[in-house]
Amino acid sequence: MENILFFFANLPVYSYGAMLGLGLLIGSYLAQREGRRKGFEPDFVFRCIVQVALVFIAAGRISCVFRLHGWRMLLYPWVLLSSVQLDERTGLFAAGLYAIYFLFRHVANPAAFLDALTPSAALMQSLAYLGSSVLGRETSSPLGVHLGEFSLHPLPLYGALLYYIIFSYLWRFRRRLRFDGQLFLGYLALGALAQRILMPFREITGESALPWLYTLAFVVFGLVWLYLFLQAPLTEARRRRYGSSWQTSLLYWAWILGVGLLMVKFFYWRFR
């Protein structure tokens, strides 16, 4: 199911594409800001984000069309532009491979560079979920999205909220790092946990080993993060950064709650 957000010049603008574009725009700005703070040129950061995003979209779209048409898509390649549906897993895998190539080819300190990009990646994922129309399994919950006689779990909303919380956590602690790569490892652990939480709400055919794989990934990345965190020295400068007032914490949680309510409102507005 593809959800049209609005029409522009008589052309449909789909919610997934619009939110993905918004995430790319905001995420690019935040990543360039963090990259500059860590000594990376903004243009260099932007070039990396655009290239990885294009690989994600191209690989995800080709995989989605190939599943429907097979090699026949070579006879009418214009079907690649007929929809915005993506195979996100294939897209993420291809984007990850290209990101690894880019890091080792062009970046002297890959761990610090990844820390600059990580909060933006979580925000992009949150907004992409918010624009998605791939709902979950049937439910009797009052939170369900009603489509005719069916009521389905609002899986994209769950994912958007989880990844926004991850983004908020990473963004808040981005200046309190003990070692390079701390944000990236934390994102891998928390992302695996988020996917494990979402698994019971997905519509899955047959048995799947993914729940155990996500649990294993969360444990492994979490333990690696904890070990490196405990091994890294806590200098006096870093010690001063860890202090925060109750007003700051209250504002932080109020902001998360406010944005979360806006996400809920927007999501159910799409299916009204």
Image (cartoon, rainbow, N blue to C red):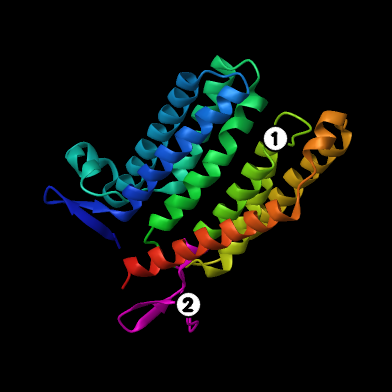
Q: Amino acid at mark 1?
A: Arg
N-term-proximal mark, 1 vs 2: 2
Q: In the figure, is residue 230 to the left or right of 53? A: right
Viewer-nearest residue: 152 or 21: 21
Tell me what residue is drawn at x 20 percent, y 44 percent. Answer: 79
Q: Amino acid at mark 2?
A: Leu
Residue under label 2, please give it. Answer: 143
> Does 101 appear above or below 196?
above
Is 153 inside the magenta-drawn segment?
A: yes
**Can you say which quadrant of the picture contains the N terminus?**
bottom left
Tell me what residue is drawn at x 70 percent, y 35 percent. Answer: 175
Label 2 crowd bin: few (<14), some (14–19), many (20+), radius 10 Å = few
Label annotation for residue 235: none
Residue under label 1, please give it. Answer: 175
Query: In this view of the protein, can residue 228 be seen by the observer?
Result: no
Magenta stretch, residue numbers? 136-159
Regarding mark 2 in the picture, which secondary structure is present there?
loop
Tell me what residue is drawn at x 72 percent, y 28 percent. Answer: 180
Is 184 inside the magenta-drawn segment?
A: no
Label 1 crowd bin: few (<14), some (14–19), many (20+), radius 10 Å = few
Is the C-beta separation of discs 1 and 2 under 8 Å?
no
